[in-house]
Image: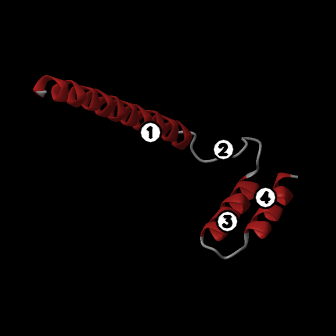
């Protein structure tokens, strides 16, 4: 009877080990995906923008980040500055 209980315990251990390995592998995969997304960096300003346009875009981003303007106002200003 002791041998049978040991075999069952072995299977439980193997399935538990498999679950841990899959959880760790999933965590590593998720961390890599998030790291790739974060390394994209902030949006780049086109090189042909004048200093005044760059300053206006920076001001627009800052006002949106500070909550001074709504998302709609930010998007509209962004469209107007790209024309």
Q: Counting residues from the N terminus, which is met first, the one under dot 3 or under dot 1?
A: 1
Whole-Å distance between the Cαs marked 1 and 4?
A: 32 Å
Instruction: Pinpoint residue 5: horizontal percent, then vertical percent.
Output: 18, 29
Q: Counting residues from the N terminus, which is met first, the one under dot 2 or under dot 3?
A: 2
Q: Counting residues from the N terminus, which is met first, the one under dot 3 or under dot 4?
A: 3
- Disc 3 and disc 1 in contact, CB within 8 angstroms: no
Whole-Å distance between the Cαs marked 3 and 4?
A: 11 Å
Q: Quick check: 64 above or below 38? A: below
The residue to which callout 1 is attached is 31
The residue drawn where x is 13% and y is 27% is 1
Mark 3 or 4: in front is 4
Q: Within the image, what quadrant is residue 56 found in? A: bottom right
Q: Within the image, what quadrant is residue 70 found in? A: bottom right
In this view of the protein, which residue sits in the foreground, 34 or 67? Answer: 34
Q: Counting residues from the N terminus, which is met first, the one under dot 2 or under dot 4?
A: 2
Q: Quick check: 36 above or below 76? A: above
Q: Within the image, what quadrant is residue 18 found in? A: top left
User: How is the rendered protein coloured?
Assistant: secondary structure
Instruction: Pinpoint residue 48: horizontal percent, then vertical percent.
Output: 77, 42
The residue to which callout 3 is attached is 59
The residue to which callout 2 is attached is 44
Q: Secondary structure at mark 3?
A: helix
Mark 1 or 4: in front is 1
Mark 3 or 1: in front is 1
In this view of the protein, which residue sits in the foreground, 67 or 2? Answer: 2
The residue to which callout 4 is attached is 78
| Farthest-out residue, left | 2
| Farthest-out residue, right | 83
């Amino acid at each position: 009877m002791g041998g049978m209980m040991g075999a069952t315990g072995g299977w439980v251990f193997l399935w538990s080990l498999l679950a841990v390995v899959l959880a760790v592998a999933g965590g590593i995969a998720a961390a890599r995906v998030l790291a790739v997304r974060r390394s994209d960096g902030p949006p780049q300003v086109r090189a042909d923008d004048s200093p005044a346009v760059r300053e206006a875009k920076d001001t627009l981003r800052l006002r949106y980040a500070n909550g001074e303007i709504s998302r709609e106002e930010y998007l509209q200003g962004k469209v107007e500055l790209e024309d």
